[in-house]
Amino acid sequence: MNIRPITDDELPAYIDTTRREYAEDKHRNGGIPLDEALRQSERETAQLFPDDRLCPGHEIFIGEDDAGARVGRLWMAPRGGAPDTAFIYDIQVEPAARGKGYGRAIMQAAAQWARDNGYRALSLHVFGGNDIAINLYESLGFTTTDRFMQLEL
């Protein structure tokens, strides 16, 4: 497996995909109406990608298998308020590549990148219903630091 930085040509499609998928996750897992989730995602994406460019310190990596086919992606950056912690904004493994160890390899590469760049911790957010991801993160040594819960009325 190869992990490389995203190219300038790939960035616009990544931003569009991330904006849409984040809104869908907020709707599906957070119970936010889709139109509001789309508005929130649009606002947050505009802040995180000013002028559709990466903010300083933000890194997006593309994972490819040995044949050069795309198997996943990862976006990470310094965590606001905790300069010694890198935060994973997004990690995705392509549906056809799931269950083959690519998620683990991408996460291990992220941890190595964070170490190499002087971070002492790596953090992320995962929606409560994403048991596969939660199990992966726990198997890599991540621990739960916060838990948000909601009761539908």
Image: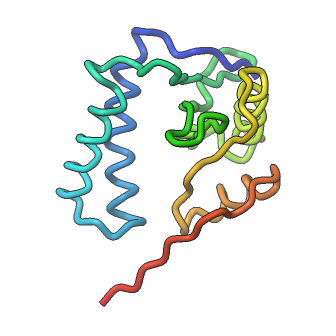
Q: What is the x, y in percent for residue 7?
A: 48, 10
Q: What is the x, y in percent for residue 113?
A: 73, 24
Residue at the image position 36 percent from the left and 58 percent from the top? 26
Residue 90 visible, this orientation = no
Left/right placement of residue 6 relative to residue 19 reads: right
- State the residue in front, 118 or 148: 118
Is the image coloured rainbow, by chain, by secondary structure, or in one colour?
rainbow
Residue pushed farthest bottom? 153
Residue 19 figure quarter: top left
Residue at the image position 55 percent from the left and 39 percent from the top? 79
Q: Does 118 appear above or below 101?
A: above
**Number of residue marks:** 0
The image quadrant where one finds the C terminus is: bottom left
Q: What is the x, y in percent for residue 23?
A: 32, 51
Q: What is the x, y in percent for residue 74?
A: 58, 32
Q: Does 42 appear above or below 46?
A: below
Left/right placement of residue 64 relative to residue 108 reads: left
Residue at the image position 24 percent from the left and 41 percent from the top? 43
Residue at the image position 77 percent from the left and 34 percent from the top? 105
Residue pushed farthest top? 8
Left/right placement of residue 90 relative to residue 48 reads: right
Q: Does 147 appear above or below 118?
A: below
- State the residue in front, 9 or 30: 30
